[in-house]
Amino acid sequence: MKICIVSDSHDNRPLLEAAVREAKAAGAEAVLHCGDVVAPSTLEVLKPFNLPAHVIHGNNTGDLYMMGLISAKLSNKTTYYGQDAGIELGGRRIFMVHYPHYAEAMATTGDWDLVCCGHDHTAAIRAIRNMSGNSTPLVNPGTVGGIKAVATWVLGDLDTMTFEIHEVVASGEQETAGTRSG
């Protein structure tokens, strides 16, 4: 199962939409948003893709009440969890939180197959040594909103546990952006 991992959209609808469009074209079957959506209405751009979206808030929480109402609609494929979430997708246990230090701590437990975070707007894929003697991938997709950094997202493959950082190619751009693996 392939997934689109984003964070820190900060209401940039066109870039969020472009990232999810690219991810779906690459085979993504779900979206993980690691916080700082800000306005809940930003998530409306996800509807046409008909993908399940798993969303937490970050430090720029916006209207949390409305976020809950949007995700409660039966016609909506968005699930809003609050400050963090432990979910299962593609047979993998995934933990989502906004803050990198919290994410790194959760990765060290060995309880999760994948830990995702955001907040610092720096895209990175790291292997964190865990208490079971193995390692847990820690994925920070950077900022899909392009806030003081290049707009990025991550395509993850839960079958192979491989992850690639992609730059967002906004509508009208002629060049294709590069990818980085981790």
Image (cartoon, helix red, strand yellow):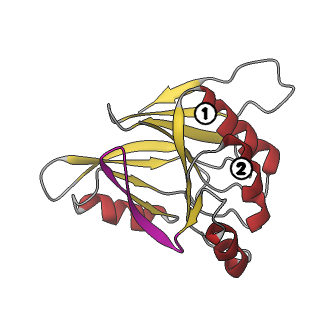
Residue 79 % position (x, y): 56, 63
Q: x%, y% of residue 74?
A: 63, 65
* Residue ID at (76%, 18%): 175
Q: Is residue 152 above or below residue 36?
A: above
Q: Main secondary structure of the magenta part?
A: strand
Viewer-closest of 35 and 69: 69
Q: Tell me the residue that label 2 is attached to.
A: 47
Label 2 element class:
helix
**Residue 44 located left or right of residue 131:** right
- Is residue 60 shown to the viewer in this render? no
Of badges 1 and 2, the one in the foreground is: 2
Residue extending farthest left: 133
Kindly check if marks 1 and 2 are in contact, taking CB atoms under 8 A apart as contact.
Answer: no
Residue 101 falls within the magenta-colored stretch: no
Mark 2 is surrounded, within 10 Å at the Cα level, by few (under 14), some (14 to 19) or many (20 or more) other residues, namely: some
Residue 91 magenta = yes
Give the residue at mark 1: 24
Decide if residue 159 is on the left or right side of residue 72: left
- 107 left or right of 148? left
Tell me what residue is drawn at x 61 percent, y 23 percent.
Answer: 178
From the top left corner, tell me how far across and down residue 153 is, in percent: 60, 41
On-image quarter of the N terminus: top left
* Figure quadrant of residue 14: top right
Q: Position of residue 75 (x, y in %)?
A: 66, 59
Query: Which quadrant holds the C terminus?
Result: top left
Q: Mark on residue 165? A: none
| Range of residues picked out in magenta | 81-94
| Circle 1 SS class | helix
